[in-house]
Amino acid sequence: MVHSCKEFWIPLIGKTTKSVITFLALSLLLSTVNWMCIHFIATYCAPWEWHGPFINMLNMGSPACILVNNIQVTVANYYVLIWGSMTTALVVWIGITMTPHVTKKI
């Protein structure tokens, strides 16, 4: 049975839109958390002033700076992982939607 273009694309667009919005929201969230961590580190752990290297020597081993630094690195790793997953999913989705579907009759 041949489906009309409208029957095929409307549900596909709805599912795709939900996935894209979820990806963009998650990317924005991770980017914001990463920015906040970097801002905290630059303000309290290693300021950009002339005495920054000396302040950094004192704060480098502080639990708060280590915690925020570890959070920032983990968030950055997740961000790269999500982009890689989205790229893989996009390539697979394009391959599936562009491949003609053949039904076999037994």
Image (tube, grey):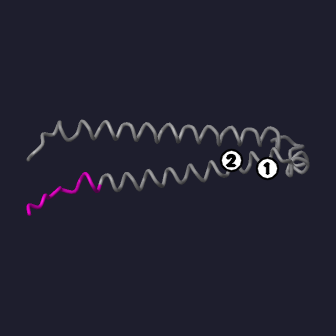
Q: Secondary structure at mark 2?
A: helix
**Contact, mark 2 vs mark 1 (Cβ under 8 Å):** no
Rendered position, 6 above or below 58: above
Category of crowding for the residue at label 2, using alpha-carbon neighbours closer than 10 angstroms: few (below 14), some (14–19), many (at least 20): many
Q: Nearer the viewer, residue 92 or 56?
A: 92
Location of residue 23 in the rendering, given as x and y in whole percent from the top left corner: 46, 42
Q: Secondary structure at mark 1?
A: helix
Q: Main secondary structure of the magenta part?
A: loop
Rendered position, 66 above or below 22: below
Quote the CA–CA distance across marks 2 and 1: 10 Å
User: What residue is disc 1 on?
Assistant: 66
Question: In the image, which residues are magenta?
Answer: 95-106
Location of residue 24 in the rendering, given as x and y in whole percent from the top left corner: 48, 39
Residue found 46% across the figure and 54% down from its top: 85
Residue type at mark 1 is Ile
**Horizontal side of residue 102 vs 20, given as left or right:** left
Residue found 51% across the figure and 50% down from its top: 82
Could you tell me which quadrant the C terminus lies in? bottom left
Category of crowding for the residue at label 1, using alpha-carbon neighbours closer than 10 angstroms: few (below 14), some (14–19), many (at least 20): some
Residue type at mark 2 is Gln
**Horizontal side of residue 65 vs 3, given as left or right:** right
Location of residue 84 in the rendering, given as x and y in whole percent from the top left corner: 48, 55
User: What residue is disc 2 on?
Assistant: 72
Residue 19 colored magenta? no
